[in-house]
Image (tube, rainbow, N blue to C red):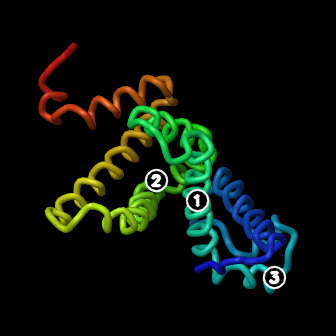
Amino acid sequence: MYKICKIEESCKRQREIEDVLLNLMLEKHYDDISVSEICEKANMPRKSFYRYFDGKEGVKQALLYHTLVDFNSFHLEKHGLNYKLYEEFETLFSFWKSKTDLLEAFDKSGLLGLIVESTTTYAMNGFDDIKKYMGNSDLNEKIMVYQFLICGLMTMMINWYRSGFAESVPNIARTATKIITKPLFENLSRTE
C-alpha cells in the first residue's frame, strides 16, 4: 500500500521514489530489488521510505496508479470532455508510447499483465460514475463490453510496444477504431 500525500513536497518525494523503482526495474527484475536498494538510490533512510509506502509493492502500485492519473490529465489537456473515438484512441496510444520506459521496465519483470489489470480496474472505477446515466437495462452486459474493450485495447497496446511501435500512432488508432466500430467477425473475414 501507499499513503495519499496531501502536501506538495510529500507528493513530489513520493513520485521520486516511484521513479527510483522504475529506473531500478529497467536494470533488473522487480523481484531482485529491495527496499534498502530503493532507499539507497533515493538517498533516504528506510524510516522515511515507510512514511510513504508499506513496502516495495506499494511503490509499484503507486507508480501504476499515478501513471493512470497522468493519462487522465494528458487526455483532458488534448480533448477536454469532447472527443471522437479515433481521437480517443490516438490519445491513448500516444500516451503509452510516451511511457516506453515504464512498459520496458514492467516487461523485463514479466509484469505487463499488471498494467492491463490496473488499467481495467482504474477504468471500471470511472465507469461506476458513468453507469448512473446509462439506466439499468443490460447494465451487466454493458459492463462486460467495457471491460472487454479496455483489456483488448491494452493488449493491442502491449503487442504494439513489443513490435517496437512498428505502426504509427495514427495507423494503430485507425485500426483500433475499425475494430470497435465494425462487427468483430466482419473484421476477421474481410480484407481490404
Q: Nearer the viewer, mark 1 or mark 2?
A: 1
Residue type, numbered disc 3 = Ser
| Residue on which the image places disc 2 | 112
Residue 18 position (above or below residue 116): below
Residue type, numbered disc 2 = Leu
Residue type, numbered disc 1 = Val
Alpha carbons under labels 3 and 2: distance apart: 29 Å
Q: Give coordinates of residue 90: x percent, y percent.
A: 48, 33
Q: Give coordinates of residue 174: x percent, y percent.
A: 38, 26
Alpha carbons under labels 1 and 3: distance apart: 24 Å
Q: Which mark is residue 69?
A: 1
Alpha carbons under labels 1 and 2: distance apart: 18 Å
Tags 1 and 3 in contact by the CB under 8 Å rule?
Answer: no
Residue drawn at (40%, 67%), measured in percent from left and top?
129
Residue drawn at (55%, 41%), measured in percent from left and top?
79
Say which label, 1 or 3, has the lower sequence index: 3
Q: For this view, does 9 lie left or right of residue 169?
A: right
Local crowd at mark 1 within 10 Å, few (<14), some, or many (≥20)?
few
Q: For this view, does 128 lie left or right of residue 145?
A: right
Residue closer to the observer: 156 or 173: 173
Q: Secondary structure at mark 2?
A: helix
Q: Write down the quadrant of residue 118 in the picture.
A: bottom left
Q: For this view, does 140 lie left or right of residue 67?
A: left
Say which label, 1 or 2, has the lower sequence index: 1
Kindly give the residue lying farthest to the top in the view shown: 192
Q: Write down the quadrant of residue 56 in the picture.
A: bottom right
Kindly give the residue lying farthest to the right in the view shown: 43
Q: Write down the quadrant of residue 33 in the picture.
A: bottom right
| Residue on which the image places disc 3 | 48
